[in-house]
Every structure is written in structure tokens, then in C-alpha cells.
Image (cartoon, rainbow, N blue to C red):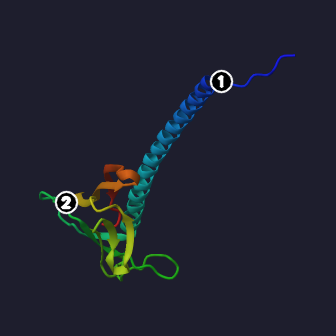
Amino acid sequence: MKKSRGATLIELVVVGSIFLSVMTALWMIYDATMAVERKVSLKVDLDREIFAAVRHVDAALRASRLVQPADWYNNPQPVDNISLLPLSVGSDGLPLLTAAGLPRFGNAFTILFDKGELVRPDLKRRFAKLGANSQVTFLRSSQGMLQMRLKAEKTGFREQTTSRDLTFQFCLFNQ
């Protein structure tokens, strides 16, 4: 009968180093995957805020008439706020009309970009939080068109940043 012999110290060191190498490789793969996931999540969060802002501005423009900016013909300049007159709506949901058959409008309200947020101050409503280094400008390029330019930047975990520079065009129906 042969005696069973145990592992030598060198065999244990070799197996241990192989195990540590495999564990280190797995950790590096996990860390790289998590870094990519955080970066993608940061971009998705920023895009979600941007498109929320666009949806709110679009809804406000559809239910209102744009008052300011009014200069579309003589070298228009970008501004950081817009003023709108909301359509007056009856209890049945239909627009109220004047005696002349024209739509009736309510009191003017403003949508502006202030301290990294797109807000409607009269309702104390925040449409989107875009960040401190962000910019939103509006430009009325023609009588029936409004441009909204967004430059947004968001910082996430481990100081990762992502940014977007987008321009949106809105058709002004109630002009």
C-alpha cells in the first residue's frame, strides 16, 4: 500500500497564485462593467431630464400663444425665457371664444432658465433640473417657429461627466 502524500508548499503557492490571478481578472471585469453602466446611466438620466423639459415646453406652446420673444424678422437674439398667453378653456375642454370668434387668452406666464433649472415661476413648478453648468436659450427664427437650444452637463459617481448640446424646433400653432 502506498501512502497518500500531501501537497508540497510549491504546489500550494502555484495554485494560490492562479486563484488570485483569476479573482483579480474577474474583479477587473466587474469594475469595468460597473464603470460603463454608471456612464450609460448618467447619460440616460441627463437625456431623461432634457426630454422632460422639451415635453413641458412643447405642451405649454401648444396650449398658448407666444408673446416674447417677438422679434423674428430683424436679427433675432437668443433669450433665456419665453412669455406665453394661455388659451382660456371652458369646462367642456373647448377653447373659449370672443364675440368676434377669436380665441380668448388668459394671463401671461413665463418659462425661464434659472440656476440650472427650467421653471415656471408663477406655479413654482420645475420642468427639468439640468445642472449648474447648463444653458437654455430660446430663439424665434420665424413667425411660426421657435428654437430651444440646450447645453446640459451632469456629473456623477467618481466625477464622471456627460454633456449634451441639442437644438429643438417647435412649430407655433397659436400665432
- Mark 2 Cα within 10 Å, few/some/many (few <14, many 20+)? some
Screen quadrant of the C terminus:
bottom left
Q: In the current view of this chain or complex, which residue is farthest to the right? A: 1
Screen quadrant of the N terminus:
top right
Up the image or down, 81 lies above or below 1; here it is below
Q: Is residue 96 left or right of residue 70?
A: right
Residue at 34%, 50% in the rendered image:
161
Out of 81 and 41, give the one closest to the viewer: 41
Up the image or down, 157 lies above or below 108; here it is above
Out of 29 and 153, give the one closest to the viewer: 29
Out of 164 and 61, give the one closest to the viewer: 164
**Tag 1 near tag 2, CB within 8 Å:** no
Q: Secondary structure at mark 2?
A: loop
Out of 4 and 19, give the one closest to the viewer: 4
Quadrant housing residue 172: bottom left
Residues at marks 1 and 2, CA–CA distance in whole angstroms? 78 Å
Give residue 81's position: percent from left, percent from top: 25, 68
Which residue matches tag 1?
Answer: 8
- Mark 1 Cα within 10 Å, few/some/many (few <14, many 20+)? few
The reply to whether residue 143 is in sight is no
Quadrant housing residue 142: bottom left
Going by the numbered disc 2, the residue's amino acid type is Pro
Residue at 20%, 64% in the rendered image:
79
The reply to whether residue 79 is in sight is yes
Total marks placed: 2
Give residue 139's position: percent from left, percent from top: 23, 59
Residue at 42%, 47% in the rendered image:
39
Residue at 48%, 76% in the rendered image:
94
Which residue matches tag 2?
Answer: 78
The first of marks 1 and 2 along the sequence is: 1
Q: Secondary structure at mark 1?
A: loop
Q: In the current view of this chain or complex, which residue is farthest to the top? A: 1
